[in-house]
Amino acid sequence: MSGERAHAAAWKAAIAATWAPGASWPVLDYDEGERLKAKSLLPVQYVLITVTQRFGSPVYMSGGRARQGWRLTTLAVAPTTDSARWLREHVEQLRDKPLAALSSSALRFESENPIEPDGDRQSGITVWTYAAPV
Amino acid sequence: MNIYTDVAELDILIADLRKAANELDRALDEGARDVAKGGNRLAVASARRTAGTHGKRYPRAFSVERLGLGDYVYGPDAAMPQGDMSFETGSRNQPPHLDIALSRDYVADQLPRKVIDALQRVLW
């Protein structure tokens, strides 16, 4: 599977699958969050993601490319630092594991921000990188 | 096989190697500086594109600082106007801009090349 839409959908499903049974915190795009906020339907806690392609994937002499580098960001948003940590811990289960749906390489940790006040919630971002077939 | 060595020549070799050690420090430091400066330039260019009217001072907050031998850091200086704003990682109302992450994709591979260049300059 390739393409940004497919990647975003795959990660949303993969992250949502890490929650404990019974929990169903949404994994959203930023604009989805904005829309829910406008309707006052924003859930108590959720994860916002972005998926973008990276420069620097190995290129064949012929100009082709076997794999494409990607960058995934996951922002855990929750009412308290502790619950934001809970979300983060669950996303962390994907660390260093390939995602079968994308035939991707292992998801590598790149950087992270501490969980900080963000409006009326607490949030902290984690940045990940991985590679997937073109 | 016999090797005849003039002691005076050995002294010259020792002196050359001593000199190389000093020059290598400088060459590696210059290499690291070039990479940091290149990365900063790319990050500024990206920030200029992504910051928008809301963050028009943000690109000017970027700087390169030397921490020690071969040790450089670049990015927005928190003491500068808008330098401490969270454009890089965003917030829940604003997606991350990832200007520095993007610049790192470009320059990270250059550092090993700079180390090889430095070695070649000093030893050959």
Image (cartoon, rainbow, N blue to C red):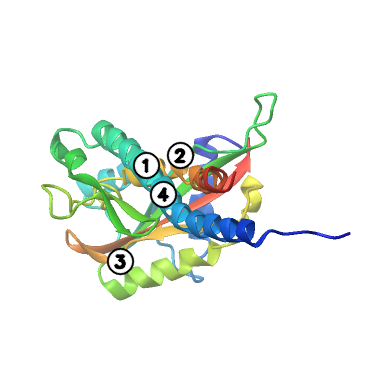
Residue sitting at x 43%, y 46%: B31
Q: Secondary structure at mark 3?
A: loop
Nearest to viewer (mark 4 / mark 2): 4
The outermost residue toward the right is: B1
Asked whether residue A29 is in view, the answer is: no
Q: Which residue is mark 4?
A: B32
- In what quadrant of the picture does the N terminus of chain B appear? bottom right
For badge 2, the amino acid type reads Tyr
Q: Are marks 4 and 2 on the same chain?
A: yes
Q: Residues within 10 Å of mark 3 (few under 14, many from 20)?
A: few
Q: Is residue B6 visible?
A: yes
Density class for disc 1 (Cα within 10 Å; few <14, some 14-19, many ≥20) is many
Between B20 and A43, the one lying in front of the other is B20
Left or right of residue A126: residue B13? right
The one of A71 and B13 positioned closer to us in this rendering: B13
Q: Which residue, given by chain and number where applicable, does mark 2 sit on?
A: B106
- For disc 1, the marked residue is B39
